[in-house]
Structures are given as structure tokens and as C-alpha cells.
Image (spheres, helix red, strand yellow):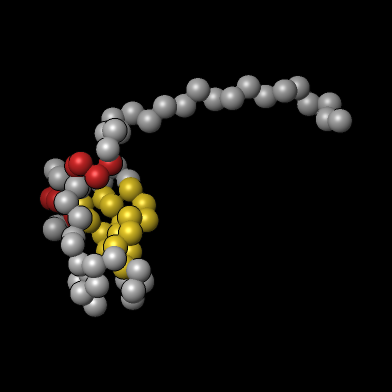
Amino acid sequence: MSSEPTRKALAATLRDTPADPGETVVLPNQCAACGHDDLTVMLRTTYVVYVRCERCLTMRTVALPGCEHEFGT
């Protein structure tokens, strides 16, 4: 048995995160490299969404609306 005191859970919340993450970004409907249409969102940040093609495993970065100027897209 550990002699450390029991730790309390952190009260963490996500701020400014929409209920439906897909509502603020228009994802490509097919892979730019191979044309396959099976794309998976791998990571979503405040500024971009990283999408991976399940056929050729190419990663693509899609800027969120309002952030295009920061990435030159």
C-alpha cells in the first residue's frame, strides 16, 4: 500500500470547443494524392485539422475557417 495521499481529479474543461467538431471545417471529399474517399480525422487543433487517407496514408492539413491567412491556404 502506498503512503502517498490520495490525489484529487483535476476539474478540466475544453473552452471554445464546438459541440460538433465537424461543423466548423469543410473537409476534403477525396485524397489529393490518390483520389480515394476514405479520409480519417487524426488530430484537431485550434487552427487546423489533420486528415489521413486510409489508402495511401498521406496526411493533409486543413485550416479552420478564419485561420487560412496564418497558413497561406
> In this image, 8 relative to 44: left or right?
right
Who's the residue at 19% across and 42% down the image? 24
Q: Looking at the image, can residue 55 be seen? A: yes
Question: Which of the two residues, 6 or 29, is positioned nearer the viewer here?
Answer: 29
Q: Looking at the image, can residue 67 be seen? A: no
The part of the image, by quadrant, that contains residue 53 is: bottom left
Considering only vertical position in the picture, is 10 above or below 38?
above
Question: Which of the two residues, 37 or 33, is positioned nearer the viewer here?
Answer: 37
Quadrant location, the N terminus = top right
Quadrant location, the C terminus = bottom left
Name of the residue lying farthest toward the right: 1
Who's the residue at 78% across and 26% down the image? 4
Q: Position of residue 8 (x, y in %)?
A: 63, 22
The part of the image, by quadrant, that contains residue 56 is: bottom left
Who's the residue at 29% across and 63% down the image? 39
Question: Which of the two residues, 27 or 6, is positioned nearer the viewer here?
Answer: 27
Q: Position of residue 11 (x, y in %)?
A: 50, 22
